[in-house]
Image (tube, helix red, strand yellow):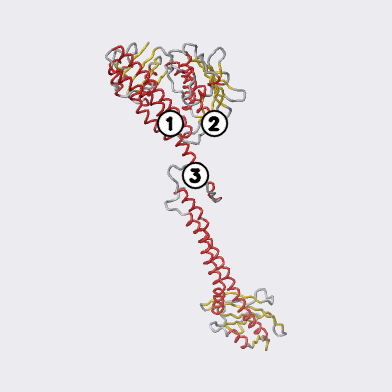
């Protein structure tokens, strides 16, 4: 439960200590008060008993009746308590009153064993203390037990008990007050290291994210450790953001500068053929910048998802089938196939499905790009004897020499085979980051007969590990960057493979968000399962510039596309589409 504003640990500690001290003082008061009452009763009870014994000694039998001579001297001793009143009652063996106060509410006797007892009672609206004594009379004319009761009010004994209490409890009260002061001072001194720790943290500069080096008290060592952990995460966060800014500034500046220069040259070029060649170069650089931006965002997204999401059970075979189907639908060079080993169809690994899709998509795209016409790209998944899962992406491209295998796994690391090909050098780095986060091992092997094999081994019970630094600011910056770069660097394409086997492909350019378009695309494919749709999300400016070369999707001239697509196209007057059978 969160504490309210203004919560004070010092106040909380003092309140509890003072409450404990108050309970202790109350207990001591009750003990001393009971002791004072017992001491006062003991002193005055001896006088009551002496008076009763003196009366008992004067009891005799005369003419067959009980006779008593009251010893006034013994009663005079009780009369020294000037505020008290004295009452007595003597009863014969038959219970008749011999002398005294007949209404004194004390029945003498009991089991008649000759012993005495003391009792508290109330008489004439006043509390009294009564001494009761039984005396055995044995006489030829009369024998039996004579009851003797002597009562005294409690004014003097209560006064004595009060004096004892005051004299005994006063030092205790002073000790409690002194103890409260010592507790206040001790708590203040004990919490002084916390105040010093606060001053140290407040005195830090905003950019100082180093560890708190002062030795903390044992009671707050875990708190200081948590603060140091947070500082380390913030430092990693800042490093990630700075790295992203440096990479983005370094990698995107060159293609954008080239785009600007080529556009200026094309604007001043009078020859239409030269203008066309310049436009082609501009398009190629725009695609390269778009892919680079997309890869940078993907890399930041992978790191962010590892930090922000909880792992879930992922059907790896189904995930690879989705990746392969999507890649095969858009690939124009190499065929992409999937082979599932025995028992691997039900293989599941804990992790983040979106990050895994991103990793395998990059691996398959790399394989397709470098394989070219060299042969099909094969994706395999097998179950290991130890319960682990192995996934491989194999191609028939030029491969990667052993000396370059570690370099191509680093960010922006490219081998000699990548010279002249559009790429950012982030695909394998993204896959490596995803593998490390999932506890998997990514390795590169030469494929027998030529080509490259990228192997990911997921151990049994592998789990998603969280990095120390968070990439949230980098992702936010990346989102802003991609919005800026999209208007100059081309649009990203998203393929929706035909559910029933592709017979034709529909390419769509639109300014509508992909999230809003996807349900309509799925509905259309449910009605026309043989159509693969490739969707490009453009800005309205790009859509306007490219519209003369495109045909509206809701037009009746949409190639050999089935007529129902026109119904799906209504409401998208800015959307442009072409189809190929």
Mark 1 vs mark 3, foreground winner is 1
User: Which mark identifies residue 463?
Assistant: 2
Image coordinates of residue 307 in percent, x first then y, are 48, 34
541, 228: nearer the viewer = 228
Earlier sequence position, callout 1 versus callout 2 = 1
**Quadrant holding the C terminus:** top left
Eyeballing the image, is 499 above or below 310?
above
In the image, 516 versus 537, the foreground residue is 537
Residue 213 left/right relative to 480: right
Q: Secondary structure at mark 1?
A: helix
Image height of 417 relative to 300, above or below: above
Q: Is residue 154 above or below residue 225?
A: below
Q: Residue furthest right?
A: 140
Disc nearest the viewer among 2 and 3: 3
Question: How many C-alpha atoms fall within 10 Å of the one at disc 3: few (<14), some, or many (≥20)?
Answer: some
User: What number is the disc on residue 149?
Assistant: none
Q: CA distance from mark 1 to mark 2?
A: 26 Å
**Mark 1 or mark 3, earlier in chain:** 3
Mark 1 surroundings: few (<14), some (14-19) or many (≥20) residues within 10 A: many
Q: Which residue is more in the foreground, 409 or 318?
A: 409
Residue carrying label 1: 244
Q: Write down the quadrant of residue 275 in the picture.
A: top left
In the picture of the structure, the residue carrying the numbered disc 3 is 227
Q: Secondary structure at mark 2?
A: loop
Q: Position of residue 394 (x, y in %)?
A: 52, 17
Local packing at callout 2 (Cα closer than 10 Å; few below 14, some 14-19, many 20+) is some
Residue 545 in the image: state x and y as whole percent: 29, 20
- x and y percentages locating residue 339 in the rendered image: 53, 16
């Amino acid at each position: 439960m969160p504490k309210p504003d203004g919560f004070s640990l010092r106040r909380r500690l003092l309140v509890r200590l003072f409450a404990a001290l108050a309970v202790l003082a109350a207990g001591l008061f009750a003990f001393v008060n009971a002791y004072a009452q017992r001491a006062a009763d003991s002193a005055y009870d001896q006088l009551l008993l002496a008076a009763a014994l003196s009366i008992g000694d004067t009891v005799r039998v005369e003419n067959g009746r009980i006779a008593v001579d009251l010893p006034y001297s013994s009663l005079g001793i009780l009369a020294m308590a000037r505020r008290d009143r004295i009452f007595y009652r003597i009863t014969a063996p038959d219970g008749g009153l011999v002398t005294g106060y007949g209404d004194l509410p004390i029945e003498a006797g009991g089991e008649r064993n000759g012993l005495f007892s003391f009792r508290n009672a109330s008489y004439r609206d006043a509390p009294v203390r009564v001494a009761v004594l039984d005396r055995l009379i044995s006489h030829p004319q009369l024998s039996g037990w004579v009851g003797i009761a002597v009562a005294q009010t409690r004014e003097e004994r209560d006064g004595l008990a009060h004096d004892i209490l005051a004299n005994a409890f006063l030092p205790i009260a002073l000790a409690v007050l002194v103890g409260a002061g010592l507790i206040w001072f001790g708590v203040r001194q004990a919490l002084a290291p916390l105040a010093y720790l606060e001053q140290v943290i407040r005195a830090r500069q905003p950019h100082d994210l180093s560890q708190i080096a002062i030795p903390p008290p044992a009671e707050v060592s875990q708190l200081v450790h948590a603060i140091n952990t947070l500082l380390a995460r913030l430092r990693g966060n800042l490093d990630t953001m700075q790295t992203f800014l440096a990479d983005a500034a370094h990698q995107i500046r060159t293609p954008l500068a080239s785009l600007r220069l080529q556009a200026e040259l094309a604007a001043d070029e009078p020859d239409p053929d030269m203008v066309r060649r310049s436009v082609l170069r501009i398009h190629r650089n725009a695609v390269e910048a778009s892919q680079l931006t997309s890869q940078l965002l993907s890399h930041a997204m992978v790191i962010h998802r590892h930090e922000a999401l909880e792992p879930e059970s992922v059907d790896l075979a189904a995930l690879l089938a989705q990746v392969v189907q999507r890649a095969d639908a858009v690939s124009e060079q190499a065929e992409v196939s999937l082979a599932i080993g025995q028992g691997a169809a039900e293989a599941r690994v804990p992790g983040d499905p979106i990050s895994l899709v991103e990793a395998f998509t990059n691996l398959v795209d790399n394989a397709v790009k470098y394989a070219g016409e060299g042969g099909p790209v094969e994706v395999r998944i097998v179950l290991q004897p130890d319960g682990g899962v192995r996934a491989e992406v194999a191609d028939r491209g030029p491969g990667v020499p052993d000396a370059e295998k570690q370099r191509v796994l680093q960010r922006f690391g490219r081998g000699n085979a990548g010279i002249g090909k559009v790429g950012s050098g982030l695909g394998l780095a993204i896959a490596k980051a995803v593998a490390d986060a999932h506890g998997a091992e990514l390795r590169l092997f030469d494929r027998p007969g030529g080509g490259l094999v990228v192997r990911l081994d997921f151990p049994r019970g592998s789990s998603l590990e969280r990095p120390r630094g968070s990439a949230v600011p980098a992702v936010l910056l990346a989102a802003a960057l991609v919005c800026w770069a999209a208007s100059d660097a081309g649009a990203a394409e998203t393929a929706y493979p035909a559910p029933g086997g592709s017979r034709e492909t529909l390419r769509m350019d639109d300014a509508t968000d992909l999230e809003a378009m996807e349900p309509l695309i799925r509905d259309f494919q449910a009605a026309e399962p043989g159509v693969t749709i490739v969707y490009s999300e453009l800005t309205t400016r790009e859509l306007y510039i490219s519209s003369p070369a495109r045909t509206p999707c809701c037009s009746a001239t949409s190639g050999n596309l089935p007529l129902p697509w026109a119904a799906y196209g209504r409401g998208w007057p800015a959307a442009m589409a072409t189809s190929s059978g």
